[in-house]
Amino acid sequence: MKCNSAQQQGRNCSAGLRRQVLRGSFGQRFLPQVPVLQWAGHLSQEEYLRLRRYPGAHGWGGVDFHTLQSTLSLLNSSANRMMLDDWDHRANGSSCIRCAVVGNGGILRGSKKGQEIDQHDYIFRTNGAVIKGFEEDVGSRTSLYTFSTNTLRNSLRSYASAGYHGPPISEETRYVFLPDHDRDYILLRAAATNSPIDRGPERSKSPPTYFGEHVTAQKFKMYHPDFIRYLRNRFLRAPALKTRYRDLYRPSTGAVMLLAALHTCDQVSAYGFMTPDFAKYSDHYYDRKFHSVGFYINHDLRMEMSLWQQLHKEGLIQLYMRQ
């Protein structure tokens, strides 16, 4: 497995995933040429004609060219092109990047894994990541926060009472959009230019404040739709794709985040993801009352759980499981 930026190609981690994956059953699933992130250099009329054939997170269908151009033109720096854009400043002589990918599963409640999580080089989180009050179990740092505009809004609505009031904000934190609609491009453009949201469900008279008052374009990244489609087709090709709901289905936001880490880090530890004993735990670690995991047609959580088990068995990730 190769990685998707000059920065990562230049690393030589002897214990890294790029060496391990070639020795196992996942070797032929990986396509090193698929970009993880999209940025200004990806947009052209030819690419637009190709990608507008695919709906939702899998392409640019339903997004007009002007919206794409005005948004992707802002993603024009190395910080936007690379997932781990500041590694040169963090490395301290190390050639291996250790990443913790933290889901929101109830298995983390009472785990006391917070300190272990925070000792990784990068910490990935997603959606309704409630940190305050749960640091002992989930850690306190956030390096990369993955979300879509829809999941962000749903999290604000559903988990406010649990303490979720928006994405983590820190000097370290970068924000990785999973574009599932034109509203994601519109929100990114407004946030990066400190401008009101000019149309759509989030239309506003003032700039969005989800990411702090002084956020700059260098803080934002956006998954490439080719990457999402590749994950769907090669890792999570669910039965739903053979039904009338095929256009609704995509890998969950947490699955995209974990598989992105697998493609950009050298060592990956996963916490708070579904394990075969998931029925023992509430849906989220911050639930005040027990809520069983919900299953919907837009994601195949059981298939994702099986994939995590396979990756763990082959040593490509270290998956946290209760003993």
Image: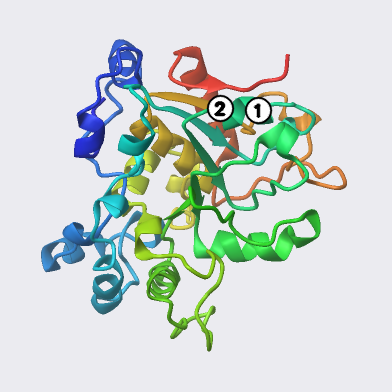
Quarter assignment of residue 68: bottom left
Dot 2: element: loop
Which residue is at a point 74% across and 42% down the rendered structure image? 283
Dot 1: element: helix
- Which color mode does the image show? rainbow
Figure disc tally: 2
Left or right: 79 as drawn, with respect to 45: right
> Where does residue 209 sit, x and y in percent of width and height?
55, 72
Label 1, on which residue?
A: 115
Image quadrant in which the C terminus is located: top right
Q: Which residue, as the protein is rendered here, is positioned at the far left? A: 46
Along the viewing direction, whichever of 25 and 138 lies nearer the viewer: 138
Amino acid residing under circle 2: Gln
Mark drawn on residue 131: none
> Where does residue 2 sit, x and y in percent of width and height?
23, 28
Left or right: 179 as drawn, with respect to 155: left
Image quadrant in which the N terminus is located: top left
Task: Identify whether 120 is placed above or below 229.
Answer: above
Left or right: 250 as drawn, with respect to 31: right
Amino acid residing under circle 1: Gln
Quarter assignment of residue 59: bottom left
Which residue is at a point 56% across and 48% down the rendered structure image? 126
> Where does residue 217 sit, x and y in percent of width and height?
36, 64
Q: Which residue, as the protein is rendered here, is positioned at the far right? A: 289
- Is mark 2 in CB contact (under 8 Å) with mark 1? yes
Which residue is at a point 30% across and 18% down the rendered structure image? 13
User: Dot 1: within a 10 Å radius of its alpha carbon, few (fewer than 14), some, or many (20 or more) residues?
Assistant: some
Label 2, on which residue?
A: 119
Q: Which residue, as the protein is rendered here, is positioned at the far bottom? A: 205
Q: Measure how far apart labels 2 and 1 are at the Cα level.
A: 6 Å
